[in-house]
Image (spheres, rainbow, N blue to C red):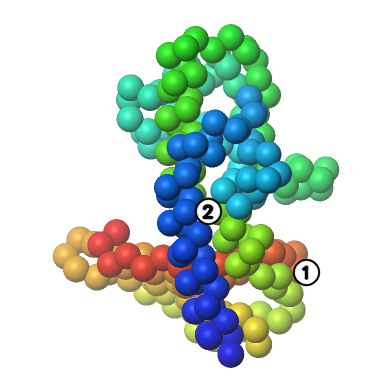
């Protein structure tokens, strides 16, 4: 039953991903100066990150022409356990300098769009097709991390991740089920996983 449930939700997730791919460039226009989307656009947003993530902009994940002076404008705070104990479950930024040039605003727009494409429909995969997992329910059926794959399950969900070599210097990057391979709380919301890539 859990596999049929996943298939149904994965199809639903795929359909909304298509919608998100088509609308991400427009949705970004509704973002706040702090890189968050309004509540009505939660399905497009990241549940655990704002859109102005420091490493994404500064570590070569965006084209050079889209990189702006991040450190002049922002101080980034990553979501970690210390913040979560204060009720802050999402990374955020402090704005150090509100004065973005027109060019910088265009660059920031591009970075935010690329971030949404990297994490397309994240909110939908978390809030709609994700499920609540009880840590006590998880059974480790098989794990051979040195060989590159793991499998966990509960009575109502499963998690399979495979990163073994595939062809030549490539490897699989398969992740299906729900992302509960590292659940740390008694009950935790886990987003749907649907990634099958043989040429990582």
In the image, 137: left or right of 122? right
Q: Which of 197 and 80 is in front in this view?
A: 197
Q: Residue furthest bottom?
A: 1
Identity of the residue furthest to the left in this view: 168
Tell me which corner region of the image, top left, top right, bottom left or bottom right, holds residue 68.
Answer: top left
SS at badge 2: loop
| Residue at the (43%, 49%) spot, across then down | 21
Q: How crowded is mark 1: few (under 14 residues within 10 Å), some or many (20 or more)?
A: few
Residue 162 at x, y percent in the picture? 40, 72
Which residue is under mark 1?
Answer: 186
The answer to whether residue 79 is above or below residue 161 is above
Which label sits on residue 41? none
Callout 2 crowding tier (Cα within 10 Å): few <14, some 14–19, many ≥20: many
As helix, strand or loop, the secondary structure at mark 1 comes to loop
Q: Picture coordinates of residue 131 (x, y %)?
A: 66, 70
Looking at the image, residue 78 lies above or below residue 184: above
User: Left of 196 or right of it: where is 92?
Assistant: right
Give the x, y percent position of residue 192: 55, 67
Corner quadrant of residue 180: bottom right
Name the residue tied to disc 2: 121
Q: Which residue is drawn at 64% across and 64% down?
A: 128
Residue at coordinates 57% horizontally, 48% vertically from top-left? Answer: 44
- The residue lying toward the viewer, choosing from 147 and 194, is 194
Cα separation, mark 2 vs mark 1, equals 26 Å
Mark 2 or mark 1: which comes first in sequence?
A: 2
Identify which residue is drawn at 47% across, 44% down.
23
**On the rendered image, what quadrant is the C terminus found in?**
bottom left
In this rendering, is residue 186 above or below 97?
below
Q: In the rendered image, is residue 193 in sight?
A: no
């Amino acid at each position: 039953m859990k596999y049929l449930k996943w298939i149904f939700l994965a199809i639903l997730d795929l359909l909304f991903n298509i919608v998100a791919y088509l609308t991400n460039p427009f949705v970004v226009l509704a973002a706040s100066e702090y890189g968050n989307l309004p509540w009505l656009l939660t399905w497009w947003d990241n549940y655990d990150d704002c859109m102005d993530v420091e490493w994404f902009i500064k570590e070569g994940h965006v084209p050079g022409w889209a990189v702006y002076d991040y450190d002049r404008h922002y101080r980034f705070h990553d979501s970690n356990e210390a913040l979560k104990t204060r009720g802050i479950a999402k990374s955020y930024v402090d704005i150090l300098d509100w004065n973005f040039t027109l060019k910088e605003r265009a660059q920031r727009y591009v970075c935010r769009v690329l971030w949404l494409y990297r994490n397309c429909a994240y909110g939908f995969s978390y809030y709609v097709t994700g499920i609540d997992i009880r840590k006590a329910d998880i059974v480790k059926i098989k794990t051979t991390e040195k060989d590159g794959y793991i499998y966990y399950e509960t009575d109502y969900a499963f998690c399979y991740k495979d990163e073994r070599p595939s062809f030549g210097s490539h490897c699989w990057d398969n992740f299906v089920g729900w992302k509960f391979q590292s659940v740390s709380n008694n009950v935790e919301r886990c987003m749907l996983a649907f990634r099958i890539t043989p040429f990582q």
